[in-house]
Amino acid sequence: MNERIRIGKRALPVALLAAGVLVTALPAQTRPKMGTAPAASTIPPRPERLKFPPLTYDAPVPADYRVPLKSGPVAYVVPDKELPLVNVVVYARAGQYLVPAGKEGLADLAGYLLARGGTKSKTAEELEERLAFLAAQLNSSVGETQGTASLNLLSKDLDEGFAILREVLTSPRFQDDKIALRKDQILQEMKQRNDESAAIESRERGFLAFGDEFFANRYPTDASVKGISN
């Protein structure tokens, strides 16, 4: 056994030498390539000279996804089977422009609490717990000229999700303790209005462009926020 090992060790350098001679003896066309760099002529000297294939994009036709509902509103249903999720967004004709004078802050308060203040059949805590169990995300807001409510959840829970969303939109609770909490948050935000110069400049630009009575320039005050109730 030991003798065969010694013979193998002596024969190894000879075998490697023979293999090296064989490789160098091959024609240039059949030698293995160790890696080649791209020709310098294929790389343009300036970035703006780079050429790319033309981009072809076929824009979707909205009419293909338009679904009129029996109750009147129009829905756009766009399938996406990449993940088993459904994302629903509801747009409403609402906003700060509908808020009467002296009630500034009402749009923000209503939009925030719509999805967080409970419903007719569920307290705010019960609604939050059920959404967490479904791993669903429910959000709502009201801006200057538009209100939105959105729901994201697994497709298998869509029926229950629609039921929750419908009750949120048609029978919101606006729980008193949640109203008080949000009012405190708005009052705290008011104290920080002048912390950044950009916020001051934005407000003043709006006053100069549209005047003090323009709906977007009517900001919440301490009195208007405290005067809002359920």
Image: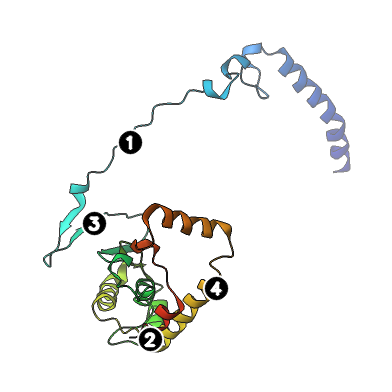
Q: Position of residue 202 (x, y in %)?
A: 48, 56
Q: Secondary structure at mark 1?
A: loop
* Residue 85 visible in the picture: no
The quarter of the rendered structure image containing the N terminus is top right
Which residue is pictured at 42% across the width and 77% down the height? 132
**Residue that badge 1 annotates:** 57
Q: Position of residue 27 (x, y in %)?
A: 66, 11
Mark 2: amino acid: Glu
Q: In this image, 146 relative to 63: left or right?
A: right
Indicate the quadrant where residue 131 lies.
bottom left
- Disc 3 and disc 2 in contact, CB within 8 angstroms: no
* Residue 23 visible in the picture: yes
Q: Sequence order check: which comes first, mark 3 or mark 4?
A: 3
Q: Sequence order check: which comes first, mark 1 or mark 3?
A: 1
**Residue that badge 3 annotates:** 77
Q: Nearer the viewer, residue 104 or 149?
A: 104
Which residue is pictured at 42% across the width and 57% down the height? 207
Of badges 1 and 4, nearer the viewer stands 4
Image mark for residue 126:
2
What is the distance, in whole Å, between disc 3 and disc 2 at their CAs?
30 Å
Q: Nearer the viewer, residue 39 or 21?
A: 39
Instruction: Report how many numbered discs are placed on residues in the image.
Output: 4
Q: Specify how the rendered protein is coloured.
A: rainbow
**Residue that badge 4 annotates:** 191
Q: Nearer the viewer, residue 95 or 50?
A: 95
Q: Secondary structure at mark 3?
A: loop
- Disc 2 and disc 1 in contact, CB within 8 angstroms: no
Q: Sequence order check: which comes first, mark 1 or mark 4?
A: 1
Mark 3: amino acid: Val
Q: Position of residue 68 (x, y in %)?
A: 14, 59
Of badges 4 and 2, nearer the viewer stands 4
The quarter of the rendered structure image containing the C terminus is bottom left
